[in-house]
Amino acid sequence: MTGKVILEGLEFHAYHGVYAHERSSGNKFELDVSVETEFGDSAFHDHLSGTINYEDIYAVVKAEMEKPSKLLERVVHSIAEKILSTFPEAISVQISISKFNPPIGGVCKKASVTINKRR
């Protein structure tokens, strides 16, 4: 049976941005991660081995968020690639990232990028 393991509202202080001041002072980011997977029978018998552990997904996201990038597109692509390579049972992944108060010369609560990647 297929299903999704979803983490919503992950918050990080990270150093992504085109401008030097963004990469030196950092900013607040929020991510939502949805991993489509095939649940094994053991998941329905209360065993973690039948699913993807969301702590492990979080560890992948955290490690990738610690690598500064200029573009949000690169960040979510790197996370998606790492999730798919780390979890062979993952079928697809959807990731949304938001940067709070982006430097656009006006009021903007957050700028976001979403990608979907299939195996």
Image: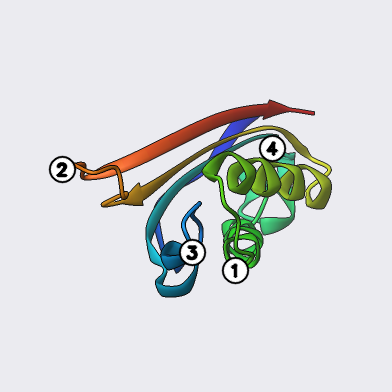
Where in the figure is residue 16, as x and y percent of width and height? 51, 58
The label shown at residue 39 is: 4
Q: Earlier in the sequence, mark 3 or mark 4?
A: 3
Residue at x-position 58% and y-position 56%: 54
Location of residue 55 with respect to 39 vertically, above or below: below
The nearer-to-camera label among 4 and 2 is 2
Binning the other alpha carbons within 10 Å of mark 1 as few (below 14), some (14 to 19) or many (20 upward) gives: some
Vertical position of residue 39 compared to residue 59: above or below: above
Q: In this view, does 116 lie above or below 112?
A: above
Q: What element carries label 4?
A: loop
Q: Residue at x 73, y 40 (%)?
A: 41
Q: Residues within 10 Å of mark 4 (few under 14, many from 20)?
A: some
Residue farthest toward the left in the current orientation of the protein: 107
User: Alpha carbon of mark 1 to alpha carbon of mark 2: how far?
Assistant: 27 Å
x, y percentage for residue 100?
A: 30, 52
Q: Residues under labels 1 and 3: Cα distance?
A: 16 Å
Task: Decide if residue 1 is in sight here.
Answer: no
Quadrant (top left, top right, bottom left, bottom right) of the C terminus = top right
Question: Which mark is nearer the camera, 1 or 2?
Answer: 2
Camera-side mark, 3 or 2: 3
Q: Is residue 73 left or right of residue 81?
A: left
The residue drawn where x is 66% and y is 60% is 60
Residue type at mark 1 is: Glu
Looking at the image, is mark 1 or mark 2 earlier in the sequence?
1
Q: What's under tag 3, amino acid-wise?
A: Ala
Q: Name the residue under label 2.
A: 107
- What's under tag 2, amino acid-wise? Val
Q: Looking at the picture, which amino acid does disc 4 mark?
A: Phe
Which residue in the protein does label 3 denote? 20
